[in-house]
Amino acid sequence: MADKVYALAIHYRGKCKKLKNIDPDKYSYIDFVADIKEVHVVGDETVFKITCTMDDSNATMNICNDFDVLSMFSRNENRIEFDVFVENVEGDSNGEGDEWIDENGEDTGGREFEDDPLHGSLNRDACTLPCETGQKVKLEKGMVFVDINAFRKVLKEFVIQEGFKVKTYVPNHTCVRSDPTKEASAEWIASKIESVLRENLRMKARGIRNELKKFGVNPQYMQIYRAKKNAMESIEGSYAESFGRMSYYDDLVLEKNEGSVVTLQCDVDETETIHSTPIFKIFFLGLSALRDGFLEGCSPFLGFDGCHLKGPFGGVLLAAIGLDGNNGLFPVAFVAVESECKESWTFFFENLSMLVGGFSVDKPWTFMSDRQKGLVETINEVVPHAINRRCARHIYANFRSQFAGTALKRYFWQAARSYSAAGFNFALYKIKELKPAAYEWLLKIPAEMWSRHAFDTRIKNDHVTNNISESFNHWVGELRSKPILTLVDGLRAKLMSRLQKRKQKGIKWSGLVVPNVVKGLNLVKEESRKCHLLVAGDYEFEVRDENINYIVNLRERTCNCRVWDISGIPCRHAVLGISHRREDLDSYCDSRFFKENYMKAYKYSIHPVPDQTFWPHGVDVTPTLLPPIIKRMPGRPKISRRKEQGEEPNAIRRSNMVKCSEQWKRLRSSCSFIKTNKKKKTPPLAGRKRKAAVISSSQPPAPAQVSSSSLCPRKIHRSFNACCRFILSQPQPPSYLGAAYLPPSFWRDRSLSSQGNKEQETQ
């Protein structure tokens, strides 16, 4: 019967549906009932009475357990297909026994199972354990479990619930209950907190311990740490195993998002030459929806930066971030690498060039960076015609390390944010007056890299810092500590949702330009009221602003202040001329700020990728890619970001509690003695002279004359120390000290030692 398969015709409520390719050796009663409910779409609460025909006779057989299922196939071994009849019954689904009955109702020989605990105990509901549904565990004689693992799981739950170990089942106990915490392993705790962690991934150890109190368990913090680690692996996946699934994820992304660029670079262990498994090295992801939206709706401006990953295998996430018309972040591509170096940046730029179709010379490609390791060299090699900008904040950090000062800081940022060459030269002249070396240091950096007045006017972008990349690193947030597959797919999901949210927001906008530009124009319009307008022609004006005359040409869209030329948004001088002509301010903005251009960036969609639950089974079992080799540095691993030079550390709250007065509990701010008897500061030299005079004096220092109501422990302590120094400096005990303070032998020894010292000094 091992090589034979059957077909079952299931009759239920006048309908007949077939089950094919049934292997009797691998078929159980639970599978049988599940298949019946599936083909006839019946709820799990329905209770059945199942009968089947036997050979070619008219006799039928009741099916109630696994043994009946095997007997059903053996009784119909001469047929490949036979009939099964299903009826709804009221009450319990367990039969009274397995009987063979002919059409006349006569018993043809059967077996009774009244004393068999297995009889009727296997049903669909037996697969769900009480501990999984949160119910209280009750053990009863005759209970049957699916396998030994299920039985052990329920038994452990029962032991923790009742507080004692089970060797022989006794319904009523009189023994002393033990602490259930000893039986609560990390695996058991993980199974209890997994559902809670799914809702709150930030739950701390204290919250987990409070959650476990309802089970009567109070585990140690290290046990909670291990349990949380196991639960997080169950929720998010294993860090090491996620690398093995990256190759299949690569294929899924390309299948669902055509035109994307996904590159997985591996390394091979040189020590293994035969059948060596590749090791993960770099993963690049550039989605076609982001690429098309960037090329059609954004200016050719990209910011580059990297952030460290916080998993056990480390790594760095490099990203290329653009700007949409509303000055919002528009990520284009990202790559996960082992470390930030020239090789990693070269790989990133080669794939990025493949994604955007090459960095053409016709476009003013502008790249903003923090001058990371190997990035500038890579840009000069791969895209030599690109415009390089350096983040002014990082330039100032290096500048401040050598030339600190508030005035230098003010003039540095004035030079960086100046739109005109005159303002830039004035700020540098002031720096030269204050510190000539600082002036020479700044001249070594080309002005087009960090000052607005030297920026290319074709790109219409006046950013002097790389804050867009820093904002993206913050936006990634908690994903940086996730496994590599969860990180990459989480970024894809966040970007997919972001595109649709921005698209829906843009549809609701009214007007020609985006809202952020409208807000800026309203502010500029208020500032323009302080200026004085002189009309020179239909489109030419002279505007006087703070004793300086500016020439505005609306036809050429230029102004002497060069704010309009560089940013693409009319300055206050141009706004005054536009208002004089009664024209709309929005129409004089650059086209990249139009709503139509903004919607082009978000008209494409990122398609979802199937969850790992629906992946082929072999992907979860067979690892095709090993994780990178862990390189552990000496010392405890650091999680917090390393502060840059000159960056302010996080504020540390210090207590201002000072123990004062007899009660030793009063605050410093409320201590009346400190307020009324505050000691005046004296020069250090005077203090040393007074101290020497006290030590060389033949009389002890006079105690402070204070009342008992205003005694301060600090002053008492200082007086006591002064007295001790005086006493120890005397060769004989003072007359005002009794013998009870120090024994005579102490002073005899000190007298002999002092005489010996005098003889040595005389010689």
Image (tube, rainbow, N blue to C red):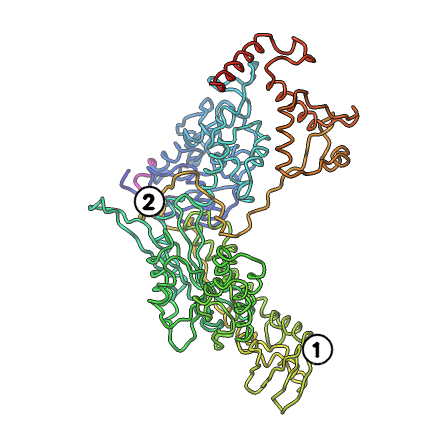
Residue 491: % across, % down: 47, 56
Q: Hey, which residue is sitting farthest left in the picture?
A: 274
Q: Secondary structure at mark 2?
A: loop
- 41 in the magenta segment: no
* Residue stretch rendered in magenta on the structure: 74-82
Q: Which residue is mark 2?
A: 629
User: What's the CA distance linking mark 1 and mark 2?
Assistant: 65 Å
Of the residues under marks 1 and 2, which one precedes in the sequence? 1
Q: Which residue is mark 1?
A: 529
Closer to us: mark 1 or mark 2? 1
**Residue 542 against residue 480 in the figure, above or below:** below
The answer to whether residue 619 of the structure is visible from this angle is: yes
Identify the amino acid type marked 2. Answer: Ile
Q: Residues within 10 Å of mark 1 (few under 14, many from 20)?
A: few
**Residue 448 against residue 81 in the figure, above or below:** below
**Residue 532 against residue 703 in the figure, above or below:** below
Residue 433: % across, % down: 54, 66
- In which quadrant of the rendered view does residue 584 lie? bottom right
- In which quadrant of the rendered view does residue 596 lie? bottom right
Residue 36: % across, % down: 45, 44
